Amino acid sequence: MKALVYEGPRDVVVKNVPDAKIERPTDVLVKITSTNICGSDLHMYEGRTDMEKGRVLGHENLGQVVEVGEAVDRIKVGDWVCLPFNVSCGFCKNCERGLTGFCLTTNPGMAGAAYGFAGMGPYSGGQAEYLRVPYADFNCLKLPDDAQDKENDYVMLSDIFPTGWHATELAGVKPGESVVIYGCGPVGLMAAHSAMIKGASKVIIVDLHPDRLALAEQIGAIAIDYSKGSAVEQILELTDGEGADRGCECVGYQCHDPSGHEVPNATMNDLVKSVRATGGIGVVGVFIPEDPGSRDKLAKKGEIVFDFGLFWVKGQHIATGQANVKAYNHYLRDLIHADRAKPSWIVSHELALDEAPEAYKHFDARDNGWTKVILHPAGMQKNPKRQSTQKKAVRKEAVHAHSPA
Ligand SMILES: NC(=O)c1ccc[n+]([C@@H]2O[C@H](COP(=O)([O-])OP(=O)(O)OC[C@H]3O[C@@H](n4cnc5c(N)ncnc54)[C@H](O)[C@@H]3O)[C@@H](O)[C@H]2O)c1
Ligand SMILES: [Zn+2]
Ligand SMILES: [Zn+2]
């Protein structure tokens, strides 16, 4: 089968690899029709992880089941399914509590496994024609009969929509509260979408890419371009000097100053300053225990200089980590089904698998207009029902999804 293979830093190619197949009776095989490129792929693409050469990338996957293992009960051939990026077992201590991002059995020695991901187990990614899905009864999210019509929305349930939602959960967002989000990439935009759905009174989002900030404004967020002045000062001004009730970190360890120079503690310390006393901070942007590729001495060891004194005095709390996608994906699916959520408004490009290497280049450069790329490995024409997300009308729907019914 054809798949996108990581060959080394900034070097990915589409080539033939051995077919994905059922390996255990609890597996299913999925023909991938939509698979996204994610900001997390970029940490690997840039050579800033210990990703092994020769591995297939892709953890944001949706498709149709083509084969089921003998021990699979619930999932049938022909089902349309979206796969959480986490590979989880369903029976370990963490999975039993719903913490499927920290499964203890699928990646022994670590907590948490994922498809096509550095340090998260041997699972091959879905930027490919087919994907093997372990513990399929547990992991597959079945999609309703509008699966194909809303494919570009439902594919966001694999990662970024639940992850954005998770950021707001970790921060503790409640109706009526103000929320500041650092990072207006796909994850930050999904955090903004989630905060709006939860009834936040004010959503402020910080980045320096005008195209991304414009998307946030389309759903009613207040955009701050931190290359044009201090974000913290503007946030304090917008919140009567108090700071926002809640803050979300949606950038991660490669956060940088306006000139592009990496400053790994920038967003965390800015959040402490931007959030009010006793407020909550949710961190879904990825931080890693070792970053040998960093120029920063401490960051090489996964450490940052953190403004703990101010954090303590303000009595804030922080929660972090990979999103437990299964904790939210059913509910978020139903919001999409009911037209109360429209995550596809951020999609900028739908491309064939062969175009993936070029797409990685543009998305990695955060080139203007490259907000979110969906690859369609089964072909661009196979699904006549799939709604193109590049129409203005669809983006308007995203705005309307936030209006009270
Ligand atoms: N916790 C999880 O489960 C989970 C899941 C998916 C992605 N992630 C992580 O979330 C992060 C964001 O993902 P994405 O797909 O949106 O990536 P992205 O790289 O496309 O977006 C990050 C955005 O942050 C902006 N940024 C950089 N420095 C900044 C600063 N100092 N202040 C404000 N904004 C700044 C960039 O301009 C960019 O637009 C990544 O670290 C990714 O690995 C985590
Ligand atoms: Zn992702
Ligand atoms: Zn588990």
Image (cartoon, grey):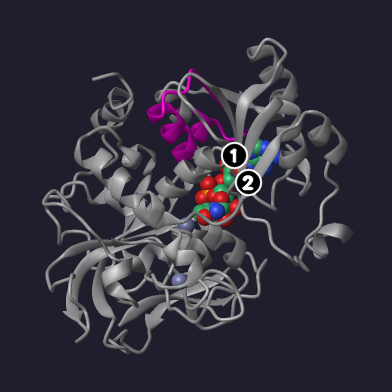
Quarter in which the N terminus is drawn = bottom left
Ligand 1 closer than 8 Å to the CB at disc 2?
no
- Residue 239 sits in quarter: top right
Residue 75 left/right relative to 302: left
Q: Which residue is mark 1?
A: 183
Q: Where residue 124 appears, x then y in whole percent? A: 43, 78
Sequence-first tag of 1 and 2: 1
Ligand 1 closer than 8 Å to the CB at disc 1?
yes
| Residue 50 seen from this side | yes
Residue 223 left/right relative to 152: right
Find the distance from the CA under tag 1 to the CA under tag 2: 17 Å
Q: Which residue is mark 2?
A: 319
Q: Secondary structure at mark 1?
A: loop
Question: Is residue 214 placed above or below 126 in the rendered structure?
Answer: above
Span of residues in magenta: 189-214
Q: Where residue 89 appears, x then y in whole percent? A: 40, 73
Q: How many dots with numbers?
A: 2
Foreground residue among 115 and 405: 405
